[in-house]
Image (tube, rainbow, N blue to C red):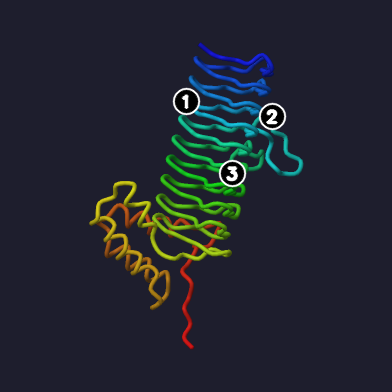
Amino acid sequence: MSKIHSTAVIENGAKLGADVEVGPYCYIGPGVTLGDGVTLKPHVVVDGRTTIGAQTRIYSFASLGEGPQVKGHDDATTTLVIGSNNEIREHVTMHLGSKDGRQQTIIGDNNMFMVGAHIAHDCIVGNNVTFANNATIGGHVTVGNNVNLGGLCAVHQWSRIGDYSFVGGMAGLEGDLIPYGSCKANRAYLNGLNLVGMKRGGMERETINTLRACFKTLFSQGGLFQERVEEAAELYTGSDEAMSLVTFIRESKSRSICMPKIERGG
């Protein structure tokens, strides 16, 4: 049975599944759909054409489904789709897609968005992702599966973040981060692979060792980068994980690849 507090405002047209809980002073707009077992703590705002999957929990002062921060936007036809079993903590913001973008912001399943995280318009976030406090991604960013974004990090518009990667706290990521990669610093540079994340994800030691070898081939300082990409494609064609690195790099178009810091001799 659903539990709706008497002070909550639920507009005509909103659709609520079974066993939904809506706390005091929440607002649910007319275009909103809440799946079964969704919980809204006090003072949550859900507006726009927003769909939230089953068992997602949303905490106080989160704002989901408002229009994107784009001048002249008309949000009448754009959407926000949030998957199931997400944990969306206090003051998180997630915006609708933009009319000139893909017109849809998409969030997967089983994610954790800590206090103050921000998902801008037209982003795609995969599954099993963690945004630490105040992690921010700009418009049109794509985040893969099993990714961790550190506190106060910021990701530039149109960037791509590959599966199992890690963005360090306070890092400013301006380019694409390869799958399994780890980056850090104020202007983020690639500082290796996300070994901790891969181990936690249950990846086999042999696979991790293959990825480390592929990483060394790709990001050594000898020869041209494109030549190293083609060399890696030949050496590791039997590894799906290694080839995902190669494919990710080959598909890089909007942003440059986040690269290791070049060590210069005395």
**Secondary structure type for disc 1:** loop
First reached walking from the N terminus: tag 3 or tag 1: 1
- What residue is shown at x 59% (from left), y 20% (from top)? 22
Above or below, 160 relative to 7: below
Identify the amino acid type marked 2.
Ala
Mark closest to the chain's N terminus, 3 or 2? 2
Name the outermost residue toward the top.
Answer: 1
Instruction: Please tell me whether mark 2 or mark 1 is closer to you in this view.
Output: 1
Residue at image x 43%, y 57%?
178
Mark 2 / mark 1, whichever is N-terminal: 1
- Residue 55 badge: 1
Q: Nearer the viewer, residue 236 or 259?
A: 259
Circle 3 or circle 2, nearest the eye: 3
The Cα atoms of the two marked residues, 3 and 1, are separated by 20 Å
Residue 102 placement, left or right of 204: right
Q: Amino acid at mark 3?
A: Ala
For residue 248, above or below residue 26? below
Q: Residue at x 63, y 38 (%)?
A: 91
Q: Residue at x 37, y 70 (%)?
A: 228
Percent coordinates x, y for residue 4 in the rendering: 60, 15
Instruction: Say which of 200 and 106 sits in front.
Output: 200
Q: Mark 2: give few (<14), some (14-19) or many (20+) Cα within 10 Å.
A: few
Q: Residues within 10 Å of mark 3 (few under 14, many from 20)?
A: many
Q: Amino acid at mark 1?
A: Gln
Q: Which percent across, then down, holds residue 179?
A: 41, 54
| Residue bearing the label numbered 2 | 76
Give the residue number, with chain letter if any, for mark 3.
Answer: 117
SS for callout 3: loop
